[in-house]
């Protein structure tokens, strides 16, 4: 049993006493894995930055509409009867309106 165990010890990847043929292969695989990890990290960073930019854009548009609504609320004035509002009164079972025949409406 000891002979088979000793025979496979030398083929561990990255082992200090391993065969010299596998060391460049493990180094190359490590470089490739590092490159893939860096690329994936860069892609995720760009996607995160794009999501933050979209969020900021939506927040800006929301603030723009809020500002426009508040400005419109401040500038609205009450309408008077002269602005086209008819005066109506209920007389008996019918409604009678006044002012619908005025000129300048």
Image: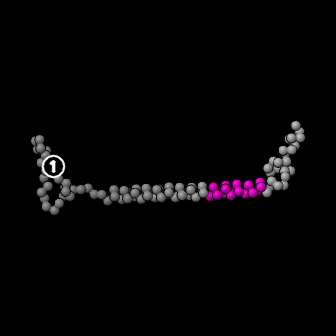
Q: Look at the magenta stretch and give its main secondary structure.
A: helix
Judging depth in this view, the residue of 94 and 51 nearest the camera is: 51
Q: Quadrant of the C terminus?
A: bottom left
> Is residue 70 positioned above or below 12 on the image?
below
Question: Which residues fall within the magenta stretch?
Answer: 25-42
Asked whether, in this view, residue 58 is left or right of residue 98, the answer is: right
> Which residue is rendered at x = 13% and y = 46% of the image?
95
> Which residue is rendered at x = 75% and y = 57% of the image?
28
* Mark 1 lies on residue: 88
Q: Residue 30 magenta-drawn?
A: yes
- Where is residue 40? Give x, y as percent: 63, 55
Asked whether, in this view, residue 27 is left or right of residue 78, the answer is: right
- The scheme the figure's colours follow is one colour
Judging depth in this view, the residue of 8 and 99 nearest the camera is: 8
Q: Secondary structure at mark 1?
A: strand
- Where is residue 24? Give x, y as percent: 79, 57
């Amino acid at each position: 049993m000891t002979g088979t165990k000793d025979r496979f010890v030398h083929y561990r990847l990255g082992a200090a006493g391993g065969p010299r043929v596998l060391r460049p292969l493990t180094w190359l695989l490590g470089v490739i894995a590092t490159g893939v990890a860096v690329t994936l990290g860069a892609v995720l960073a760009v996607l995160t930055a794009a999501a933050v930019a979209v969020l900021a854009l939506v927040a800006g548009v929301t603030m723009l509409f809020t500002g426009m609504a508040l400005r419109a609320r401040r500038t609205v004035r009450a309408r008077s009867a002269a602005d086209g509002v008819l005066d109506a009164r209920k007389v008996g079972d019918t409604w009678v309106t006044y002012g619908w025949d005025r000129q300048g409406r």
